[in-house]
Image (cartoon, helix red, strand yellow):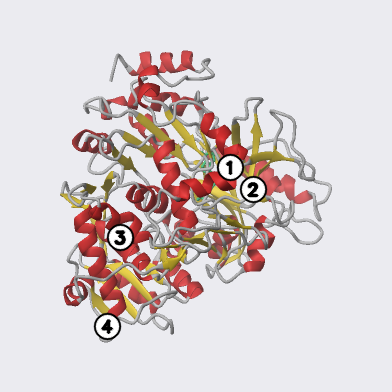
Amino acid sequence: MAGAGTEEQLAQRLEELLAVERFAPPESFTEHALIKDRSVHEAAAADPVAWWAEQARTLDWFKEPTVALDDSNPPFYQWFTDGTINASHVCVDRHVAAGNGDRVAFHWYGEEGEQRDITYADLHRDVQRMAGALKARGIGRGDVVGIYLPMIPEVVVAMLACARIGAPHNVVFGGFSAESVRERMEFSDAKALITVDGARRKGKTAPVKVNVDEVMGDLPALETIFVVRHTGVDTPMTDGRDVWVHEAMEAAPAEVPAEELPAEHPLFILYSSGSTAKPKGILHTTGGYLTGVAWTHKYVFDLKPEEDVWFCSADVGWITGHSYIVYGPLANGATSVMYEGAPDYPHKGIWWELCEKSGATIFYTAPTAIRACMKWGVEHVEPHDLSKLRLLGTVGEPINPKAWLWYHEVVGDGRCPIVDTWWQTETGAIMITTLPGAQDAKPGIAGTPLPGIDAAVLDEDGNEVPPNTQGLLSLRRPWPSMLRTLYRDDDRYLSTYWSRLGRETYVVGDAAKMDDEGYVSVIGRIDDVLNVSGHRMSTAEIESAIVSHELVAESAVIGQADEDTGQSVAAFVILQGDLEGTAELEADIREHVAVRIGKLARPKRIIWTDDLPKTRSGKIMRRLLRDIAEGRALGDVTTLRDPGVMEELQQLVASEQSESG
Ligand code: PRX
């Protein structure tokens, strides 16, 4: 790291750099970049559908599509409908067939310093066996398979094995509770679940299978629970239902061919938070999704698969992991780093140690993680040789310019371009960013729509707002990796995304501004969805978890600005009868939310109250609660049923703040 000097000198330099509005790609980067100018944007804009069809051709199809877009029934768009393909074939078999079986797909690092290299040939062997194991339990085309695994290579094998036989997977993030898993298995009628004996986290082991057993009980569709042996903790197995993965794989045939599937065959469902308590099952299909993730992974990250080592710090349980740990990198034949543990375990420099060890050249993480690293200090970065890094990326939430600059200067040594990538579970792949060899980066501003993407900032009537004016971020043209629907809920798909501006304009749910060069800055969600450390959470879902506590009468949850996590969960809670809030009860409610949803949904702050601001029709006015929690002047209170509530709440929060000093 060149000349970072002391923390004070660094702070001063960052302060000075705040005045710099744009960073051009270094010439040395552009010289070797796959895309050096904006001609690709122009070529794609001339005929986006034809351009996407051309990109799709780089995948290895069984039968090449002749149809690109079927837009006969908007917004139920379909892509490449007459083509046939298989994601596990594209991600594994074709690389082996091309003689690249010995290439490392994953340098895997365990929490306690373990290391395993998994080649494409290894994946080819294991994915077939796992696919055979699934088939032996009667799982086939269209059967949903749940996956609840930590960051171990088996999670990739499980996903690809499902893809191989046309069984859509439904991955649940390992940080979600067993109850959340049950709910997601129930909603999707999963026929099997692939989980683990135990998961390690910061030196401790959680008995995952035992926790799953406690809640899974009686789901009629769930016939099999496959268990990966990872930690060796005691794991009771239920006869007839539970199967050890290693035993099932041993018994399975060595060759299980990838099934030839239509391009629109469902690849996966991924549940994400919406504005009601029930999570949305976002459905992605095969050909279009692969086209989107392969193109963006290659060109946004300037990937040269023979030379680069790719490190995405996300968890596979989120869309970032699906698209940029599993499908994008593997479709491109990349070599990736996969890390099992937390960013601060066994020490706060573990990511940088792994970058050095693996020779990582491209690193992709979330702004919240960068802010945490900033707090921990440069001394955790400095000891490591990061000279191989050449490109950095962020995703998940807006990045504040100071964190951007710290990332640029400290991790990237001032020489690595940064791509700030905007996208969503729904979009499948990156939609807005800068192409690092072709466009300047502006700290805090994501970038322009990618080639083939028509993003715009619109008013309530669907007209473009003038530059630098806030409006609704929207996507006006279908794109191949878009969600196809919400699983078994077409109506919710229509009402969530396509009711505000019609059936041809996808309303993202974010407020944004576009500058006069077409760069988009994303301001934040316009619905009741929170973004905590780049993780999407629903206020309604957390409220419903809090209210299910036996001593709680009512609750309203809001997102509060938070220096570290972007937003944090604050909950206004009304207790039953005359009960008084106590520290114990607060801890109990937080734990209750952890069990119902997961630790990440626990309220950081609980505010006890006797009443909530409601409209005359009984709707809670969260906007006013946000004003109160953040100490702002109150907005319009005239529609309140009882404006007196606000005064009481303000006093309450003020006294709480003076108590906490
Ligand atoms: O609000 C935007 C924010 O994250 C939301 C999507 O969340 P999710 O589906 O969980 O996917 C996260 C990972 C792709 C968006 O609606 N968001 C994502 N990336 C950015 C962002 N906000 C600002 N800048 C970004 N780069």
Q: Position of residue 317 (x, y in %)?
A: 39, 56
Q: Could you tell me which residue is drawn at 27 percent across and 30 percent down?
A: 380
Please tell me whether mark 4 sits on a helix, a strand or a loop: loop
Residue denoted by label 4:
238
Q: Nearer the viewer, mark 2 or mark 4?
A: 2
Are the two marked residues, 1 and 2, in contact with CB atoms closer than 8 angstroms?
yes
Q: Nearer the viewer, mark 3 or mark 2?
A: 2
Q: Crowding near pointer 1: few (<14 within 10 Å), some, many (20+)?
A: many
Are the two marked residues, 3 and 2, in contact with CB atoms closer than 8 angstroms?
no
Q: Crowding near pointer 3: few (<14 within 10 Å), some, many (20+)?
A: many
Q: Determine if the C-beta at disc 3 is less than 8 A from ligand 1.
A: no
Spatial CA span between label 1 and label 3: 31 Å
The residue most toward the bottom is 240
Q: Nearer the viewer, mark 1 or mark 3?
A: 1
**Disc 2 or 4, which lies upstream in sequence?**
4
Please tell me whether mark 1 sits on a helix, a strand or a loop: loop
Q: Amino acid at mark 4?
A: Thr
Residue denoted by label 2:
477
Residue denoted by label 1:
453
Total labels: the figure holds 4
**Disc 4 or 3, which lies upstream in sequence?**
3
Residue denoted by label 3:
155
